[in-house]
Image (cartoon, grey):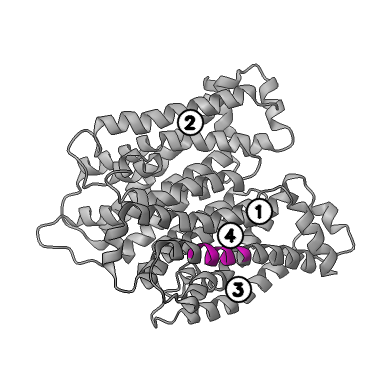
Amino acid sequence: MLPILQSEWFKLRKAKIVSVLFTGPLAGFLLGFTIHGDVPEGVNPWHILLLFMNVIYALLFLPLMTGVLAGLICRYEHQAGGWKQLLTLPVTRGKVFTGKYIILMALVLFIQLLYLGAVYGVGWAKGFTEPFPLEIVWKSIFGGWIASFPLVALQLWMSILFKNFAAPLAVNAVFTLPAILAVQSERFGPYYPWGQPFLMMYIGGGDGVFFVPWEQLLLVVGGSFLVFFLGGYIYFQRKAV
Amino acid sequence: MMGPLLRTEFLKIKRKGFWLLTFLGPFGVVALQMVNYGVRKDYLFQQSDDRWAYYLHNVHDFTPLALVLGIVILTSLMASIENETNAWKQLMSLPVSKYSVYLSKFTVLSFFLLAASFLLMVFTLLYGIFLDLGPDIPYADLARYSFYPFFASLPVLALQLWAAVIFRNQGIPVALGVFGVILTYSSYSLPDWLIWKWPTLMNGWNEPVLNVLWGLLAGCALYVFGMIDFARRDVK
């Protein structure tokens, strides 16, 4: 498994991945400065900042970015018979798929940490003196990461299926845009997989380990992860290269 | 020269999903309101006396996002025809100028986006009538909300087309596009000079037609810049 991860990482390094990784935190950083709300007395300004920045970041950026990263990780293979070359090596298709997935999840975690840095940077530049709410932030950052598990699995599936970037992005957009409406609904929001990154990063949520109840996490995030991951895994096993 | 070039472009995009996307964009925007009104119609009706205006406003909440995303998807798809098969060399070795190739791609994209705007108007009108929002249908506003965003988004189209044709790695124009979508979504708090804000038809003067004018001017400027840059580059 380790050599597969190494080779995937090696291929990605030359794919201009760094500039792509930094777009989101950069956008978050810039947008953080445009928030000009008055902070009410007694409220930690970090909370206000997180509330505003999380909306843009978790609702649109994170779900859409999973698609771009998934496209990048399959880009080499789609060019000039790359799938054939890769799969003639002594590797199993299952391991290749899992390896690509692990690398993607590591990149998403990295983006989440960059975003954490962006939040901290905005607060620092604005001169917040209140203590940084570390516990809440970690809950938010890790929650968003876990909520992206099923989304990444679906996008990896779509990126293996389609040769170009545009078609997976279209699939992604079709599911991501309705999340803007879905998360406003108390009845449907909890069941919509593309709304979960927002709900799990929303710092006004519940008091548990994460901001959403365990049942919702296991059922919606876990369930859709299983469906998408197995779907992609089985599709890749049968794909004609 | 443009006639044959346009015909070849239309031939190349057959069965690539352009028509499907052109239908899906406006349909999705109205379908979101079908869900919205389906779930909480009574609540939404209480929000405003002018139900048509409120409904158009709700539809328009999603139009700019769908439009900017649609531009990113269509431009990338358009460029991938040549990118995927290394066909730029073949295309350029024909007796055609690079300017007219670029123009024909831009024209085809504009055509699909205009078709999408028209469909948006039709779908919005049909669902509005179905909702029974009142006898006075504001046709002028309906047309404005459907077509103004297209003209206001011409600079984004010009920029994305340029990025899509010059980068072999489509991850870069797509990432740029995602960045733009985020700016469009948060445009309420952004300055007026950002092109990604224009499709929302918001500006400091509350004059949507200004965005159309800026869009046409900046769209032409960015288009010419992109075309010249494309023509000066080596064919890969």
Q: Which residues are magenta?
A: B115-124
* Residue displayed at 33% across by 53% down: A55
* Label 2 secondary element: helix
Q: Assess disc 2: are there few (<14), some (14-19) or many (≥20) residues with their C-alpha within 10 Å of its C-alpha.
A: many
Q: Nearer the viewer, mark 3 or mark 1?
A: 1
User: What is the x, y in percent for residue A18?
Assistant: 51, 46
Q: Which mark is residue B18?
A: 1
- The residue that disc 4 covers is B71
Residue B62 shown in magenta? no
Is B116 left, or right, of B85 in this rendering? left
Quarter of the picture holding the C terminus of chain A: top right
Residue A99 image offset from top left, x and y in percent: 52, 26
Residue A159 coordinates in the image, percent (x, y):
58, 38
> Amino acid under label 4?
Ile
Question: Which chain is disc 1 placed on?
Answer: B
In terms of depth relative to the viewer, which is nearer, A219 or A2?
Answer: A219
Kindly identify the residue that appears in the image at 38 percent across and 80 percent down: B204
Secondary element type, mark 1: helix
Task: Report the predominant secondary structure element of the magenta stretch.
Answer: helix
Tell how many labels: 4
Dot 3 corresponds to which residue? B219
Q: Foreground: B116 or B176?
A: B116
Quarter holding residue A188: top left
Q: Chain of mark 3?
A: B
- The residue sitting at the right extreme is B95
